[in-house]
Image (cartoon, helix red, strand yellow):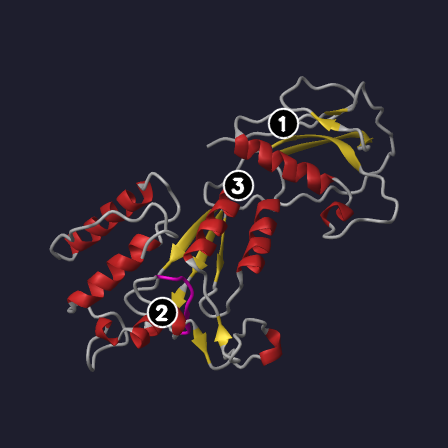
Amino acid sequence: MKNTFVFFWIVAGGFLNARATGSDAPIALVPQPLQMERKTGEFVLKNNTVILVDLEAGPDGVVIVAEGGPGLFYGMQTLLQLLPPQVFSPIKVKQPVTWSVPAVRIEDQPRFQWRGLLLDVARHFFNKKELMNFIALMAQHKLNMLQLHLTDDQGWRVEIKRYPKLTQVVAWRKDIGFGLNPKDGTAYGPDGRYGGFYTQDDICELVAYAKARYITLVPEIEMPSHSGAARRAYPECGCKGGPHAFCAGNDETFTFLENVLRKVTWTDPKLKNWEYFKKRLDAHLKRLKVQKVNYRQPDKNPGKSK
């Protein structure tokens, strides 16, 4: 998918004049664009500046041209990075700032379709607000995939209403662990235990927040090993005296995993991801000579049912 932002042009009423500065200071952009041509001068934004999209370039302004929404969004992130760093201040800037951008011509497109990060919320929990801040920072840097490590031996982080002990019991542990200073974390419940989880309504809100910034949330549910939290809550999913993993010999294991996976196929309202998941799993089971699994469709809205 090609989303190109070519150059920038801003018009306020008539044309605004660019101020020549002669500065050769480097332009810091993350990631670096495909092409960037430095020109003479800079453009100053004022209170009555209007951003116009898809116009022919003029000598005294900025224009963003793209093939679609993602390209326009990423073009705006580039424009923000060209402005003084105070533009990212979380509070109102009181000191005088010249809101100027250097005169440049930039052409860019994603080098990689998957530009992702992994956040391990299973071992160290980040609440919904913290996760939204993380997503906003990803968007500023044009990343588009956030893999959430939701389950492991140390904790379970997503509500599955059919299995309440996952969040009532194993979403919490007695301390922060890993030899860390307890004061290094803030995820403590009223009883002093460390942990937390995302409700199904939280997940719906996070998916929508990320989607508005062209970011996909990718849920990670560990199996067959790294499943200690789930097996502590529901021991019937493990083998007696067997390895520390989900037990493939128990029907309860497959019932549990199917019910969980049906609740975490958030990424595509048309359920294409579920079809892709089934296709990949069927191919894997065929190689293992395992009988085909009978599937049920996942829930379209994870916040409305068990």
* Residue at 53% in and 80% down: 192
Position of 45 with respect to 292 (left or right) is right
Marks 3 and 1, how far apart at CA: 22 Å
Instruction: Give the mark toward the camera: 2 or 3.
Output: 2
Q: Secondary structure at mark 2?
A: helix
Q: Amino acid at mark 2?
A: Leu
Q: Earlier in the sequence, mark 2 or mark 1?
A: 1
Residue nearest the observer in this picture, 33 or 292: 292
Q: Which residues are magenta?
A: 154-160
Indicate the position of residue 159 as horizontal and vertical percent values: 39, 62
Residue at numbered disc 1: 6
Badge 2 local density, few (<14 within 10 Å), some, or many (20+)? many
Residue at numbered disc 3: 212
Instruction: Give the mark toward the camera: 2 or 1.
Output: 2
Residue nearest the observer in this picture, 254 or 286: 254
* Residue at 45% in and 65% down: 197
Indicate the position of residue 248 as horizontal and vertical percent values: 18, 67
The dominant secondary structure in magenta is loop
Position of 78 with respect to 223 (left or right) is right
Residue at numbered disc 2: 166
* Residue at 49% in and 50% down: 205
* Residue at 31% in and 57% down: 306
Q: Secondary structure at mark 1?
A: loop
